[in-house]
Amino acid sequence: HMLVVYTDVYLQKLWTVYEVASFLCLHANDRMTVIPVICPTILIMVLLLGWVRNVLTLIMDMYVDGMYVDGAVKLIMSFIVLRSLRQWAREKGAIDARLQNFTVRRCTCASEEDRPVVYRNIAALMRATLPDVDLTDDDNALDAFDNLVRADLPLALSSSFGKTVMPYKYIAAVMTSWDGPWLLDRLAGLHNGMPIMDAMRWALYYLPICFSILPLFIHAFGRISSCFLHLR
């Protein structure tokens, strides 16, 4: 299994492109996990937003009607989440654009003396990977390598990113951190004689919110945030 910590320069460096394409030649796309450096940043920020929301709601609930406090905090957080998802959508769009226009000949190399060596290795790799294709000429082999990166790397990225704005397990983890404490707080009433049926009702109320309703909202926010990316 290969883990790629992706930055803007990853597809611009000759050696990193060579290593990822070599891996894809020998293994299936699902054996590679790609984590852009912006993704953990957004995830941590959203987790912190959930913590801030819970703290603010608890504090302000002592002075203002809890319903209005929770609604105002959710509105502010929705705006921040939309901004974060829009930034992530821009990043994904930039990655797609780089892949569509990728060519190994435009990659940079710290030592230009290494370039012929890497080119020869790439040509040999492509001849071994595609024995039925005439790749006796190194230029044809490099073109085949470009096509491989454009075709297979987006699939690996899609497998890592998920079909929505981000993998469901990440969204579910975030939603659990947001509303999980409220559910635990309600279930704590079991120690004070709260009926089991009341605890089950609270669980049936919160669990669908955490694992289906809120993830659907995040998915919808992601769709909205990916629209009109050319506008600032």
Image: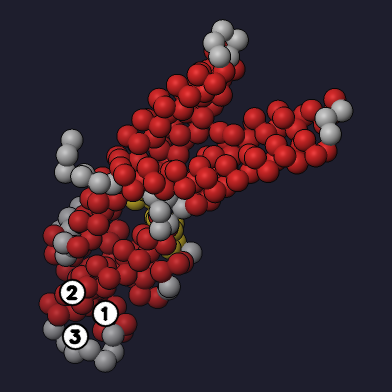
In primary-sequence order, the first of circles 3 and 2 is 3
Residue 215 visible somewhere in the drawing: yes
* Residue that lies at the very extreme toward the bottom in this rendered image: 132
**Labelled disc at residue 174:** none
Distance from label 3 to label 2 (Cα)? 9 Å
Mark 2 sits on what residue? 142
Kind of element beneath mark 3: loop
Residue 97 higher or lower than 152, as above or below: above
* Residue that lies at the very extreme toward the right in this rendered image: 193
Kind of element beneath mark 1: helix
Do the CB atoms of the residues marked 1 and 2 lie less than 8 Å apart? yes
**Labelled disc at residue 135:** 3
Few, some or many residues within 10 Å of mark 3 (<14, 14–19, 20+):
some
Few, some or many residues within 10 Å of mark 2 (<14, 14–19, 20+):
many
Kind of element beneath mark 2: helix
Residue plotted at (23% across, 61% down): 99
Q: Position of residue 78 (x, y in %)?
A: 40, 32
Do the CB atoms of the residues marked 3 and 2 lie less than 8 Å apart? no
Residue 44 higher or lower than 26, as above or below: above
In primary-sequence order, the first of circles 3 and 1 is 1
Q: Position of residue 82 (x, y in %)?
A: 35, 36
Mark 1 sits on what residue? 126
Which amino acid does the dot numbered 3 rest on?
Leu
